[in-house]
């Protein structure tokens, strides 16, 4: 069998990178559509509903079961290991096609799916902790490198990340020209980041975009809840006539 030339190997590597980028882009769109569905269905719990014991609106399982965290696997008794393996098997069967992560609340054993189950609302303490992290001193510009990313749409965008990384770590990013999120096909480190303060501007712009997106989701959830209240009120009135 003839060996491939260097050009052929590069071409095959680029094809693999494109397929991986397109898959990452599709997964990103898939999750975005699921988030929109959660908004339409008013599936997000409020903090008060969570603390009142409302079950997950995605899978119906409790979020707060009061059973405590699972111990490390090497510390489980044979009986407890059997319980863990049964719970793990049930989760895998229920979510075998979800292609997502799993999560649970600290101090509780019920396991939830990143694709099926809306994430729980943050507590006031968690919000304060995140605010403190975001308000901390940004990374120094001299510690950042600029990267040129070629996206699935063919456009090239510039991003920065810490110099410790030997490859660009994020598989999907926003394309300003397309106005949508695109998979990253190739990434090329171009050298130190640009002007002083650029990293801070990028960080603040990203935080602002995330905050706006969260606000839009919250507004959509409120609107969906209001529509549900109106609909239920009308049904209740009609039932009494």
Image: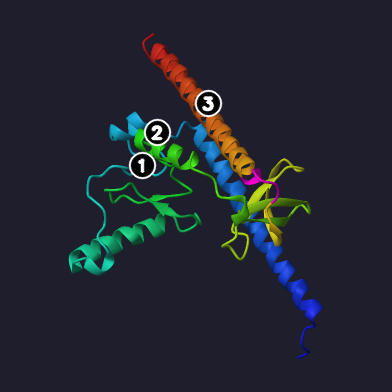
**32 displayed left or right of 81:** right
Asked if 142 appears above or below 39 in the picture, the reply is: below
Residue, disc 1: 60
Q: Residue at x 28, y 35 (%)?
A: 53
Q: Position of residue 48 (x, y in %)?
A: 33, 29
- For residue 179, what is the image quadrant? top right
Q: Residue at x 45, y 55 (%)?
A: 101
Which residues are the magenta region? 194-199
Q: Position of residue 195 (x, y in %)?
A: 70, 47
Badge 1: few (under 14), some or many (20 or more) residues near its Cα, within 10 Å?
A: few
Q: Position of residue 83 (x, y in %)?
A: 24, 61
| Magenta part, dominant SS | loop
Magenta-colored stretch includes residue 213? no
> Farthest residue in the bottom direction?
1
Q: CA distance from mark 2 to mark 1?
A: 12 Å
Residue 219's mark? 3
Badge 2: few (under 14), some or many (20 or more) residues near its Cα, within 10 Å?
A: some
Element class at badge 2: loop
Identify which residue, 132 or 43, lies in the foreground.
Answer: 132
3 and 2 marks in contact (CB < 8 Å):
no
- For residue 88, what is the image quadrant? bottom left
Q: Residue at x 78, y 54 (%)?
A: 154
Residue 45's mark? 2
Circle nearer the N terminus (1, 3):
1
Element class at badge 3: helix
Q: CA distance from mark 1 to mark 3?
A: 24 Å
Tag in front: 2 or 1: 2
Q: Position of residue 70 (x, y in %)?
A: 26, 57
């Amino acid at each position: 069998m003839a060996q491939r030339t260097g050009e052929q190997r590069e071409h095959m590597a680029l094809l693999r990178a494109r397929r991986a980028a397109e898959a990452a882009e599709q997964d990103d769109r898939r999750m975005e559509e699921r988030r929109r569905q959660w908004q339409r269905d008013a599936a997000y719990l409020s903090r008060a509903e969570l603390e009142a014991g409302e079950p997950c609106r995605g899978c119906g399982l409790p979020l707060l079961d009061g059973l405590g965290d699972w111990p490390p696997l090497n510390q489980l008794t044979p009986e407890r290991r059997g319980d863990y393996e049964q719970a793990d098997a049930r989760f895998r069967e229920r979510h075998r096609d979800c292609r997502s992560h799993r999560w649970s609340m600290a101090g509780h054993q019920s396991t939830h799916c990143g694709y099926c189950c809306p994430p729980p609302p943050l507590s006031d303490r968690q919000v304060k902790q995140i605010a403190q992290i975001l308000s901390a001193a940004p990374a120094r510009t001299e510690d950042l490198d600029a990267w040129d990313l070629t996206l699935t749409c063919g456009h090239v965008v510039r991003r920065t990340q810490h110099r410790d990384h030997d490859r660009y770590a994020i598989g999907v990013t926003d394309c300003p020209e397309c106005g949508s999120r695109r998979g990253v096909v190739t990434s090329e480190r171009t050298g130190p980041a640009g002007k002083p303060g650029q990293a801070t501007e990028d960080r603040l712009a990203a935080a602002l975009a995330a905050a706006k997106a969260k606000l839009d989701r919250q507004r959509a959830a409120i609107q969906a809840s209001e529509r549900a209240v109106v609909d239920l009120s009308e049904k209740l009135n009609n039932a009494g006539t």
